[in-house]
Each structure stands twice: as structure tokens, then as C-alpha cells.
Image (spheres, grey):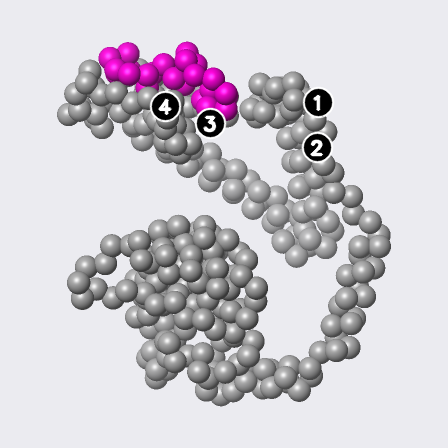
Amino acid sequence: MQTLTKDIPLDKVSWSLITASTAASVTMAQYVAVAQDAGYDVGILRGSIQNDPIHFRYCGFRRLRALRTQQILAYETGLTNVADPLGGSYYIENLTDRMEEESLHVMKQVRDVGGMEEAIRTEWLDRQFESEAVKRQKELDSGEKLIVGVNVFTTEQEKTTPLGVQRVSSNSAKQQVAEVKELKRTRDMDRLNDAIKRLRDDGVYIRSMASRGYLGGLSRATYDVIRIMEAMGNEVVIVETLGAGQDEVDVIHIAHTCLVVVTPGMGDDIQAMKAGIMEIADIIVLNKADLDGANTSLRHLQGALAAGSFEEGEWMPRVVRTVSAADKPENLQGI
């Protein structure tokens, strides 16, 4: 913290959380808490950056939010259990070592029962999940593990307001079985067979790859597979990523053209604000454009693009409406 702020005249800095947005309030409160935990003197800060989240000079939801932020930092994050959470490698190295040790311990347990297949067949894996769930609940009930708003620092309203419980009826399962049977009965078998035939086309190769925990929306082996496909003479290689968050953007480093596919009714106005995703798009595909709300989603996307800053001559992504189920060749014209 001292390194980050050494060139800033802190005695002239003023930030009040009274009018700050939710994200800014929580972020600044976290920095204050972490700085204090690291021994940094935040008392020289002017204004109420050190007062709003600590002495609660304002009321209502913002005061409660600031209080909850401090409580979460103190009781859930573990920041107060280490001397210097922002610096030094010991804490991170220790955490990494513990994760490795515990992972190897679980892997050894799986080997001891005869492998993963045997663990699933004998329901050993299910018992482990149940055991961990019971253990966690006991920790919460005893207060050994604290979760703000669950078993500590709860308001009277939170204590007395019953949580809605979704009860699963046996009729629900019967209804789903009936729906599946009806789907099979009314399914267009000719269309299904055509789709299967296309999958078996000698000119098409489809390979599903597990991410195996690799981040970025791709498998670690994706890069090598693409090179192999190109070496085999495949002119077009299509890579479908996994995930839909702001971090799943590694495909931009390997693809000549990036398509971001969205659908109506899936919070496109929120998706349009995910800069990490929208900034990699060469073309934005609005699929299921025949559904209600497609025009609204289109306006949201076009508005987000119009608000972006594009230099002269820079490519500006286009929004292409399509209905993939219609299986029309013209759907590819925009690409």
C-alpha cells in the first residue's frame, strides 16, 4: 500500500463514500481496511474515506453496506490472519503449498478406493460430498466458521424472515418424463438424421475438449490442435469457447475473427456492459432473433457499440441477427 501511494499527497486526498456508487464504496472501504491491516496510516487522509466505513456518519443502506464490508473483511477473508496480505511471497507460497497438499491427499484417497470409476460406482464420492457438507454445517452452527449475514451479524429482519424453500414434487419428475416422451414423439426425425449425417461428413471434424481447469475460455491444448488442423489442410477452423465472463477472452489471440453470440432475454443489456467480452468482438451475433425482445436486445447492443470509442479507420463490430435453427446459408453472409 505504501508503494502504491508513495507519490500521492495523501494529506490532500479527499473521498467521501456518502455519494459514491456501490462499487466505489465497497472498493475504497476494502482498500482502507487492507491498508490498516498492513500498518499503513490512513489517518492522514482528508474527508471521510476513513470515517464513512468506520464511524458511520451516514445512515441507511450505505451505512449497513459499509459495516458488512468491514465485517466480511475481518471474519471471512482471512486478511486479519496474516501480517502482510499485500506483500511478500510467504503467504501466497504457503497457500499454494496447502492447496497442493490437500489435492494430493484427495487424489491418494481416490487411488486407494480403486480409482475414480470405482469411487463413483461405490458411491464413495457422494459420501465425501455429504461428509464435507455436514462438516461445513457443523462449523457454521458452532460458530467456528463465520459468514456475515448467515450466522453472525444478522439483523432482526434476517432472523425472523423465513427463507422461501422450493419443494420438489414427485409430479414434477413425472411431468418432465412426460415432456421428454412427447418431444421424442413429435421430433422431426428426418431433420435429426440429416444433422447426424452432417456430423459424419468426411469434410467436417468435430472435437470436444475439456478445459481441465485452464482459464481464459480455452483448453490448454487448443493452440496445438489448431496448428494440427491447419497442417492437415483444413481451411476453416471454428473454435467455440466456454464460459461467458470477462476473463474468457483468450480466443482473441488465436482467431482471425471473433464472434460474440448473445440471445434475447438473457440480460443482453448487462452483457453489453461486459467490456472484456464486447471488446474482443469483430462481429456480434444476435441469435434467436425471431423471439420476443430481439429488437430490444439489438438496440442495447447497438447503443453499447455507439458509446464506444473507435478511432478513424478502426473496425467497428457489427451486429448480425440470425436464427441458427433455421439452417439458412445466408446466416453466414455477415461473417
Q: What residue would you read off at disc 3?
A: 77
Q: Name which of mark 2 and mark 3 comes first in the sequence.
A: 3
In the rendered view, tell whether residue 116 sits above or below residue 232: above
Q: Residues within 10 Å of mark 1 (few under 14, many from 20)?
A: few
Nearer to us of marks 3 and 4 is: 4
Q: Is residue 169 left or right of residue 128?
A: right
Q: Position of residue 130 (x, y in %)?
A: 70, 39
User: Which sits in the foreground, 164 or 96?
Assistant: 164
Q: Secondary structure at mark 1?
A: helix
Q: Position of residue 303 (x, y in %)?
A: 37, 57
Contact between labelled residues 3 and 1, with CB atoms less than 8 Å apart: no
Q: Is residue 148 left or right of residue 309?
A: right
Q: Amino acid at mark 4?
A: Leu
Q: Residue at x 42, y 23 (%)?
A: 79
Q: Amino acid at mark 2?
A: Leu
Q: Name which of mark 3 and mark 4 comes first in the sequence.
A: 4
> Which picture quadrant has residue 142?
top right
Q: Secondary structure at mark 2?
A: loop
Q: Name which of mark 2 and mark 4 comes first in the sequence.
A: 4
Q: CA distance from mark 2 to mark 1?
A: 9 Å
Q: What residue would you read off at disc 2?
A: 163
Q: Secondary structure at mark 4?
A: loop
User: Which sits in the foreground, 328 or 229?
Assistant: 328
The residue segment tinted magenta is 41-68
Q: CA distance from mark 1 to mark 3?
A: 27 Å
In the rendered view, tell whether residue 271 sits above or below residue 183: above
Q: What residue would you read off at disc 4?
A: 17
Residue 46 sits inside the magenta stretch: yes
Q: CA distance from mark 2 to mark 4?
A: 32 Å
